Each structure stands twice: as C-alpha cells, then as structure tokens.
C-alpha cells in the first residue's frame, strides 16, 4: 500500500467488503467513496460496498506492513 494510491471509480455486480489492516491500530488510513458518500477508515477497519455501487479507494497513510484489500461476495462468473 502506498500513500496516494488510488483505484479509479468502478462497480461490481456483487457486494464487496473492503478490509484495512496494519501492524498497529491507526497505522493505515484510507478513504472509501461509494455512490458519492466518502468514509474515512483507520486500521483495523472494514467497509461494506453494496452490489452495483460505484466506488473507489484512496490511501491516505500506510505504515510498512499495512494492507488494503477487498473481497467480492457472491458468484462473479
């Protein structure tokens, strides 16, 4: 994870859970914007993104060993 890392707005046909983890609480911070509403997260955190919602992620701060990742929920085939 690099500070300023950004995913362009995108959508999925299924819901997604966005996870933010780091070696110590608060060592990583991101913004998750879904359908125009922005939420700031500090590790450890997770955020549900509904199916079909346009969303993006922006890394604000990330100490070494921090990870930001999403898991798609449901069949994507």
Image (cartoon, grey):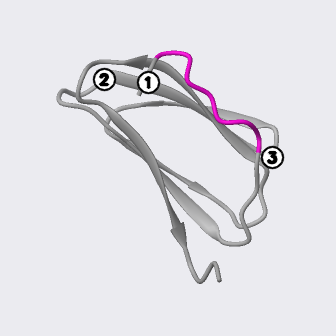
Give, as a single range, the part of the protein colored magenta. 3-9
C-beta proximity under 8 Å, tags 2 and 1: yes
- Above or below, 76 against 21 in this view is below
Relative side of 33 to 62, left or right? right
Which residue is rendered at x = 29% and y = 18% of the image? 63
C-beta proximity under 8 Å, tags 1 and 3: no
Q: Is residue 35 magenta?
A: no
Position of residue 34 measured from the top left corner of the image (x, y, whole percent): 72, 45
* Mark 2: secondary structure: loop
Position of residue 23 measured from the top left corner of the image (x, y, whole percent): 18, 30
Position of residue 47 measured from the top left corner of the image (x, y, whole percent): 52, 49
The answer to which image quadrant residue 68 occupies is top left
Give residue 35's mark.
Answer: 3
* Mark 3: secondary structure: loop
Q: Residues within 10 Å of mark 3 (few under 14, many from 20)?
A: some
Give the CA distance from mark 2 to mark 1: 7 Å
The answer to which image quadrant residue 13 occupies is bottom right
Relative side of 40 to 33, left or right? left
- Above or below, 18 against 36 in this view is below
What is the residue that sits farthest to the front in this orientation?
77
- Above or below, 12 against 26 in this view is below
- N-term-proximal mark, 2 vs 3: 2
Q: Is residue 4 magenta?
A: yes
From the image, tell me which residue sits under label 2.
26
* Mark 1: secondary structure: strand
From the image, tell me which residue sits under label 1.
29
């Amino acid at each position: 994870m690099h500070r300023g890392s950004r995913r362009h707005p995108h959508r999925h046909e299924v819901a997604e859970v966005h996870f933010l983890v780091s070696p110590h609480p608060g060592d990583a911070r991101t913004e998750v914007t879904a359908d125009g509403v922005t939420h700031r997260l500090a590790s450890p955190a997770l955020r549900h993104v509904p199916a079909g919602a346009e969303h993006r992620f922006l890394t604000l701060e990330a100490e070494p060993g921090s990870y930001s990742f999403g898991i798609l929920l449901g069949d994507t085939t």
